[in-house]
């Protein structure tokens, strides 16, 4: 029996044309309903060990795309809460990838609400990029991060960290490779000896699926 959110998912897939550089994320616009186990499809919530201190909800009154966004509120003193999604990353080794999202805040402390992108070797973080903390009360703004995918990357993780008190929102998340090998390059045949272009990382084995 199809659930309501599957229709949204189908609409998102149908509309996600074409750009070869796009790295597809599940439920990137947070239009899907929270499932029966209280989870946001496609996204994984984690927090610092100790007392559960975050309320995570789909907000159907605020959005920059579609009708919904994700909202995380800290309800007790705690170090961090995070919502994130992992995608296979080994096909992008050596390429520059860009994550972007729309975020807003209400009464967030100085440590802020940030977009975060991590390059993982399975459980180990090889490299991480974070946006500058968005603090206080702020309307929607578009933020971006770029990073070069390091050797040994198995997965790319994109998400949001609430590092202080307050409430953060996110919507319209994208992930894409900006590597030149994904574009037509008319100068590629000149062969002037300048071979500093980044190497394309070839996936040496098929990606593992859980
Ligand atoms: Ca949305």
Image: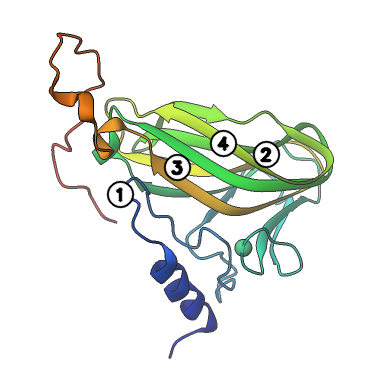
Counting residues from the N terminus, which is met first, the one under dot 4 or under dot 2? Answer: 2
Within 8 Å: ligand 1 and the Cβ of disc 1? no
Q: Residues within 10 Å of mark 1 (few under 14, many from 20)?
A: few
Gap between marks 4 and 2 measured at Cα: 21 Å
Q: Are marks 2 and 1 in contact (CB under 8 Å)?
A: no
Counting residues from the N terminus, which is met first, the one under dot 2 or under dot 3? Answer: 2
Within 8 Å: ligand 1 and the Cβ of disc 4? no
Gap between marks 2 and 3 measured at Cα: 17 Å
Q: Position of residue 149 (x, y in %)?
A: 35, 29
SS for dot 3: strand
Counting residues from the N terminus, which is met first, the one under dot 2 or under dot 1? Answer: 1
- The quadrant of the picture occupied by the N terminus is bottom left
**Disc 2 target residue:** 80
SS for dot 2: loop
Q: Residues within 10 Å of mark 3 (few under 14, many from 20)?
A: some
**Disc 3 target residue:** 157
Gap between marks 3 and 1 measured at Cα: 19 Å
Gap between marks 2 and 1 measured at Cα: 35 Å
**Looking at the image, which residue is at 72% across and 52% down?**
54
**Quadrant of the displayed image that contains ligand 1:** bottom right
Q: Are marks 4 and 2 in contact (CB under 8 Å)?
A: no
Counting residues from the N terminus, which is met first, the one under dot 3 or under dot 4? Answer: 4
**In this image, 79 relative to 210: left or right?**
right
- Depth check, mark 3 against mark 1: the one in front is 1
**Looking at the image, which residue is at 29% across and 31% down?**
180
């Amino acid at each position: 029996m199809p659930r309501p959110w599957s229709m949204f998912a189908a609409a998102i897939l149908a509309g996600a044309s074409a750009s070869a550089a796009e790295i597809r994320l599940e439920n990137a616009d947070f239009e899907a309903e929270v499932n029966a186990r209280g989870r946001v499809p496609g996204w994984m919530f984690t927090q610092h060990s100790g007392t559960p201190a975050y309320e995570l909800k789909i907000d159907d009154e605020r959005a920059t795309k579609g009708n919904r966004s994700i909202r995380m509120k800290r309800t007790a003193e705690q170090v961090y809460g995070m919502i994130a999604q992992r995608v296979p990353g080994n096909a992008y080794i050596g390429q520059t990838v860009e994550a972007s999202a729309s975020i807003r805040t209400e009464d967030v402390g100085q440590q802020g609400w940030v977009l975060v992108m991590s390059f993982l070797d399975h459980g180990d973080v090889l490299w991480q990029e974070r946006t500058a903390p968005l603090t206080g009360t702020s309307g929607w703004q578009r933020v971006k991060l770029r990073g070069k995918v390091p050797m040994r990357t198995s997965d790319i993780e994109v998400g949001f960290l609430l590092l202080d008190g307050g409430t953060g929102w996110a919507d319209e998340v994208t992930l894409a490779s900006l590597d030149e090998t994904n574009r037509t390059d008319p100068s590629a045949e000149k062969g002037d000896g300048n071979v500093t272009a980044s190497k394309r990382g070839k996936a040496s084995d098929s990606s593992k699926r859980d």
